[in-house]
Amino acid sequence: MIPLVVAQITDFHLQNNPDQDYRGFNVEQHLDRVVDDLLLQTPAVDMIICSGDLVHHGGPEGYQRLSRRLARLPVPSYWIPGNHDDAQLMLKSGDQQGGQLNQRSVVAQGWAIILLDSTASPDGQGGGSLSSTELAFLEQQLQQYSTHHCLVVLHHNPLPVGSNWQDQIMLANADQFWAVLGQHHSVRAVINGHVHQASDQLRGEVRVIMTPATSVQFKAGCQQMVLEDDPVLRQPAYRLLTLHRDGQIETSIKRVEG
Ligand SMILES: [Fe+2]
């Protein structure tokens, strides 16, 4: 049986002006390297999931440039917002692909991929929550796809990563999120962005998989924000997930030259 292969790319932090750096790096070029690498992976990759912080200042230009870049890839892409995004503007400015950005779940090969917006009740520091509407949507989707294997996607990490400054801005209502998931046994994994580093944890039977950014990486296990200085770990990166029919997940991180 053919598995479903998903590429997760996250945290592009595109600037309004493409020549402007983000934390000392040209993140526009970093994204280009990743898209070039993805082009080599297709047609093995079935879809792209962009898991938030697509732009840094919420302006329309970055979304339009992102849309043009992803149009190079012969597969659909699905976008969710992060704390740096403007969700309404994102949908309006980026949707040149026939309405895929308004699609909140994707069902294929025995899997249901549920896309959430975790940017409600922002704390101004980068944190965010799932609104009551969003939690109800998650509940409804898990009921609807109870016979599928489910993959839940959101920007904010629902588990801490062990960095003090980042654990303060994780998903604020993670308890409510886990309470919904606890009522269902079809969720195989949760994937998120936001942390700009790799992590693969288990909470009960649910795998929680976090993915490095295309833009810049944050060093793990720090009290305050420290940019990754390891020559390999600091490279722009993305994640490949192979979703098998039996619910197993194989995953790997692809790092590209910055
Ligand atoms: Fe980010």
Image (cartoon, helix red, strand yellow):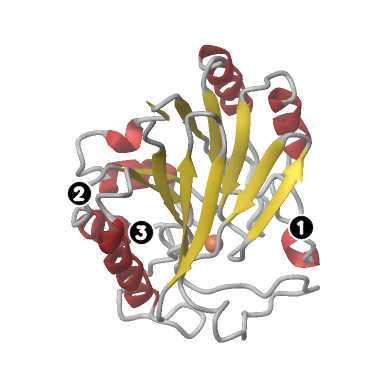
Which element is circle 2 on? loop
Q: How crowded is mark 3: few (under 14 residues within 10 Å), some or many (20 or more)?
A: some
Compute the Cα span from label 1 to label 2.
37 Å
Q: Nearer the viewer, residue 127 or 250?
A: 250
Q: Nearer the viewer, mark 3 or mark 2?
A: 2
Q: Residues within 10 Å of mark 2 (few under 14, many from 20)?
A: few
Which residue carries the number 3 mark? 59
Which residue carries the number 1 mark? 167
Give me the residue at 46% from left, 45% from top. 242
Q: In this view, does 17 lie to the left or right of 171?
A: left
Compute the Cα span from label 3 to label 2.
26 Å
Which residue carries the number 2 mark? 74
Q: Nearer the viewer, residue 37 or 212?
A: 37
Amino acid, disc 2: Pro
Q: In the rendered image, which quarter contains the C terminus?
A: bottom left
Which element is circle 3 on? loop
Q: Nearer the viewer, mark 3 or mark 1?
A: 1
Compute the Cα span from label 3 to label 1.
27 Å
Q: In this view, does 192 lie to the left or right of 32?
A: right
Amino acid, disc 1: Asp
Nearer-N-terminus badge (1/2) = 2
Which element is circle 1 on? helix
Q: Which of 61 and 218 is in front in this view?
A: 218
Amino acid, disc 3: Gly
Tell me residue 56's x, y (percent): 45, 64
Nearer-N-terminus badge (3/2) = 3
Q: In this view, does 255 lie above or below 19?
A: above
Q: In the rendered image, which quarter contains the N terminus?
A: top left
Quarter holding residue 168: bottom right
Which quadrant contains ligand 1? bottom right
**Cβ of mark 3 under 8 A from ligand 1:** no
Give me the residue at 55% from left, 42% from top. 249
